[in-house]
Each structure stands twice: as C-alpha cells, then as structure tokens.
Image (tube, rainbow, N blue to C red):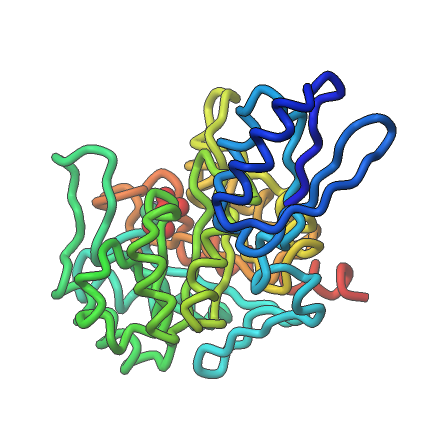
Amino acid sequence: MILVLKKDATPRQEARLLAYLEQLGLAVTREACEGSAVWLLSGGAEWVDSGLLSSLPMVESVLPTADPLPLASRRSHPSDTVVQVGEASIGGGRFCMMAGPCTVESEEQLLSVARSVKASGAQLLRGGAYKPRTSPYDFSGLREKGLELLRKARRETGLPVVSEIMSAADLPLFEDIDVLQVGARNMQNYDLLRALGRCHKPVLLKRGSAATVQELLLSAEYILAGGNKNVILCERGIRTFSGGVRSTLDLTAVPLLHELTHLPVIVDPSHATGKSRLVPPMALAAVACGCDGLLIEVHNDPLHALCDGGQALLPAEFADLSRRVAALLEVVRR
Ligand code: PEP
Ligand code: MN
C-alpha cells in the first residue's frame, strides 16, 4: 500500500503517523515525489483499513499495490477458464444455451419445457426450486419437490440442470444438482459464497442489481479463494431509471469482464428486460458483444405461469431465437 502525504503535513504529524504505522507492525519506506512524502507500507499492509488511513488529516491519498483479484483477474490467469458441465463447455470460445422455466411448477410443465428446449439445442435446463421473491406472499418454489422434478427432467432429457441455492444450509439438498445458481439478491451473501468455494461444483454467479462489475468480480474471488475454479458470471441487468423494463441490461459488462477476468460470462436477457418481446433482440445483442452463453426463461403456458410469465418465451419462440443465435454466432466468430 502506498500513502501520499499532504504537502503541508507537519514534521510532527509525520512523526505521529510513522509511530502509529510502526505500532501496527508495518515496515515503512519513505520517499519524496514532487514535493510530497510518499510512503510505501509493507509487512501486512493488506490487512490495514485503507479507509481509516485515508481519513487521517495528514494523508492525501492511499493507493493499493496488491492485486485485489489475485485469482479472478485476467492478469493472474491469461487464458480463458472453461467450465465443463456434462457435455457442455462454457467459456473459451464455446457457446452454451441454458433455458427453462423461471420456476419448477409441476412435472408436466417442467418435462414439456425440458423436451422442447432440448429439441431446440439448449445444453442446460434451468428451473428454480427455491425462489427468492421480493414479496413474502408470492409463490416461493416447490423446494425439495422442485429439485426432485429437475432430477427427473435430467433423467428424461439428459440435460444437466441449473437451479438457485439461497442458503449454505441447503447445500446437502443440492448435492447432485449440476450447476448452483447464486441469484442477484445473494451476490454479496459472503457466507454462501464461501460455502460454494468449498464445494467444487460449477457456480453460476449473477450480478446484483445494484452491483458494480468490480463487486461482481470480488464475489467471484470469494468462491475462487475457497478452491472452486468453476465460476460462471452472469450479467442480468442492473437497477434502471428507464421506464417500462425491469432492469437495464449492461452489455458493456460483457467485453469489460472479458478484459478483466478469465471466467466465462453469460447473459440473462429475461430478467434484464422482464418482457418476452424484448428478450430476443437483447439476446442477439449479447451474442454480438461476445457472451459465452445465454440464460433464457421458457414456459409452455406463460399466461398461467406462477412466476415471471411476462418474460417467458414460448417453446416455438425459443426455437426461433436459437436458430438466430446460431446464425449470428457464425458471423460474430468469423
Ligand atoms: C432467476 O434466475 O430465476 C432469478 C431469480 O434471477 P435474478 O437472481 O437474476 O433475479
Ligand atoms: Mn425468473
């Protein structure tokens, strides 16, 4: 960590600061640069609260020297991470389509959607069993029964399944679920992230609706720091002030994340837009800017869906979108 002192810092202030830093156990190397004192702190400086140091009256600024993302950053790991889920590869120039209902509602609903998305080329089946709902009075999922139906759909179709986990305490129930989704609301649930870091299963980490790209990467770092290298990032829209849509789909995040990290980046245009007619154009835009996959909500009867019916594509609409995505990939990857 580097401290730049104010030009008018008095020798007395400098002496007091030095004594304080040394009392914290830090080694201080003092230099001068353009009339300011510049101090390099080492010997455990990563544990010191930089906010506290920058609040001291004689301190102009505090600059970090250590990489805040030693595991997630592209600098630390230049080649793309490819997450393998059954036969699907996510990242490293491969494209993965994930689709299914927002919520598992019944055997008939899930199997019908699973068969149709598989026929249209989806490689993973999504479906929520434990649903985070903004209102406590809304349908919050079939829970264990929902996971059971996902296993059944996997047996029938061969598609690996992705489902949201909300609490580390539920991990034993998700033991044979192929990909564990961390929803936007839980992106900064650090106990959950740490528990997922210890479990070595692919994790689909969604960006929080008010989170910066840097915060998303720091959440991924929690999982990586536990030893789990299988992290897939998902841009799903951020809090908007544009009327008529659920969120603003921040597509800038896709190429930016590809620059900053080696982890695969997928896009969820369903939750970003909240409107089924806006899903195909935003899905195609996401493909055009280089995402590694899409997460799309599909329902066989959206008008009677228990959750997110307004943003669900019909199976035929999903089939059409899949064809257009395949055609666009040919152009984008040429
Ligand atoms: C979901 O994928 O069903 C979901 C709840 O998404 P998000 O966490 O992005 O709101
Ligand atoms: Mn949903």
Residue 88 seen in this snapshot: yes
What residue appears at the point 14 percent right and 36 percent down from the top-left corner? 136
The residue closer to the viewer here, 267 or 187, is 187
Q: Is residue 66 left or right of residue 109?
A: right
Is residue 121 toward the left or the right of residue 41 in the image?
left
Query: Residue 107, position in %: x, y?
Result: 18, 66
Look at the image and tell me in which quarter the C terminus lies: bottom right
Residue occupying the point 50% across, 78% down: 84
Image location of residue 28, percent across then percent down = 65, 46
Q: Position of residue 217 (x, y in %)?
A: 53, 52
Residue located farthest toward the right when viewing the structure as drawn: 34
Residue drawn at the location 62% of the way across and 53% of the way down: 42
> Up-down: is 134 above or below 289?
above
Q: Camera-side residue: 152 or 290?
A: 290
Q: Quadrant of the N terminus?
A: top right
**Residue 204 versus residue 301 in the image, above or below:** below
Indicate left or right for 43 with 152 as reference.
right
Residue at 71% across, 22% down:
6
Q: Is residue 320 visible?
A: no
Of the pair 175 and 319, the residue shown nearer to us: 175
Q: Is residue 159 left or right of residue 291?
A: left
